[in-house]
Image (cartoon, rainbow, N blue to C red):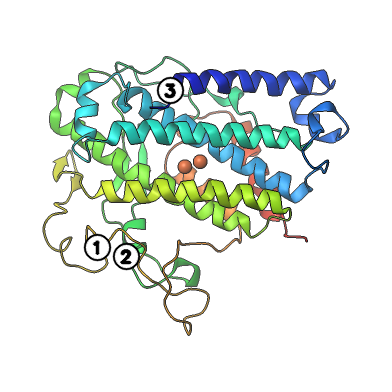
Amino acid sequence: MRQVSGLLKRFTDRRSFLKSSAMAAGVSAMGAGMFPGNSAAQDLDGERISEGDEAILRFLAAAEIIESDLWQQYNELGGVNGGSQPYINALEQLDGDLPQYITDNTDDEISHETFLNAYLVMKGGRPVDLDGFRTLPSSQASGARQIGRLTNLFNLTVDTSWWVRYRSETNPDLGATFPQVVSIVNRPAIPKNNTELNDANHTQALANTAGFHFAFIEQGGTSLYAEMAQKVSSLEVLRIVVSIGGTEIAHFQTWHDKAGNAPPLSDNGLVFPNFNLPPFTNGETVQKNKIMPEPCQFLNPKLPLCSIIRPTDAKDAAKRALAAFTHDGLFIGQTNNEFFEFMQHLADAADAARRRV
Ligand SMILES: [Fe+2]
Ligand SMILES: [Fe+2]
């Protein structure tokens, strides 16, 4: 197993390094990009990335910081060294390997965040730092570190339309819309405290919600990287975007396979159906084991159906990703408007980037 704690340590060291290298250049981290001649700007091929590529990588770095923050909360409670055994037991109902997958997904997001920021610095760009906005409360349940968070996992409204979208022959890029397979509105995905875990049915509801949230987050990354790749100018940045994007797809595929194992239950109005009964055993657009992307319309309905990830329309992709995070409830409780303004600024800049070769 890769050790998250070791990675976190290196991650912290790296962040200290990022800050100190910017300081050494006599500028703040935010202003480092103004001075392409500083020591942090020395890179492998001696070229500074374009403004557009920098904007794309900065938005992706911010998205990865947000992903890391939420995955760390899941990992502390339900990962391989997670501290909340009743929660782990419930997660394992979806798959006995779930704690390992949670820990590995967490490691991967931290590596994405750390790599993107380090690459930005290496190319004379500005890294992204959201530490000042880590003000949301932690869970009080066993295992959770008592630190400020960027994301809130207690009031999630999980968009589960990806379930039907990936089983359908129609494509959101051509205007198709898809129903929710489970209605998860304003629900917790982790326990607030140990007392909450005394109710086994409720604990399973937390784990089931988490199971669908995992897939929601990673299908978002799947589309976001494919969308951003179309705006990139540098071949090296394109390589980064498609390479990290592939890992997001691997994550989504894993979670997609596990979500359908969520046991049926009803918890104070939240209902998970029995995925082992019709229509989930025989209905084409909801069938549980149809986890591979069904061939769908792509580019033009006159063309043959094609198995692809979707959506991939690059228009307003960063703004849509930010809106999806927000609608998910991840930022409920964030009272500092500067956070939303900064994220909007990053999204606007990324969406304004155009491919130039
Ligand atoms: Fe990621
Ligand atoms: Fe991800």
Q: Which mark is residue 167?
A: 2
- Foreground: disc 3 or disc 1: 3
Secondary structure of the residue carrying tag 1 is loop
The amino acid on which the numbered mark 3 sits, given as a three-letter code, is Gln
Which quarter of the image is occupied by the N terminus? top left
User: What residue would you read off at disc 1?
Assistant: 286
Dot 2 or dot 1: first in sequence order is: 2
Q: Are marks 2 and 1 in contact (CB under 8 Å)?
A: yes
Give the x, y percent position of residue 167: 32, 65
Q: Residues within 10 Å of mark 3 (few under 14, many from 20)?
A: few
User: What residue would you read off at disc 3?
Assistant: 3
- Foreground: disc 2 or disc 3: 3
Give the x, y percent position of residue 255: 33, 46
Give the x, y percent position of residue 131: 59, 24
Comparing 42 with 181, the one in front is 42
Residue appearing at x 18%, y 32% in the figure: 202
Q: Which picture quadrant has residue 230? A: bottom right
Dot 3 or dot 1: first in sequence order is: 3
Residue 319: tell me if it is visible: no
Comparing 209 with 333, the one in front is 209
Compute the Cα span from label 2 to label 1. Answer: 7 Å
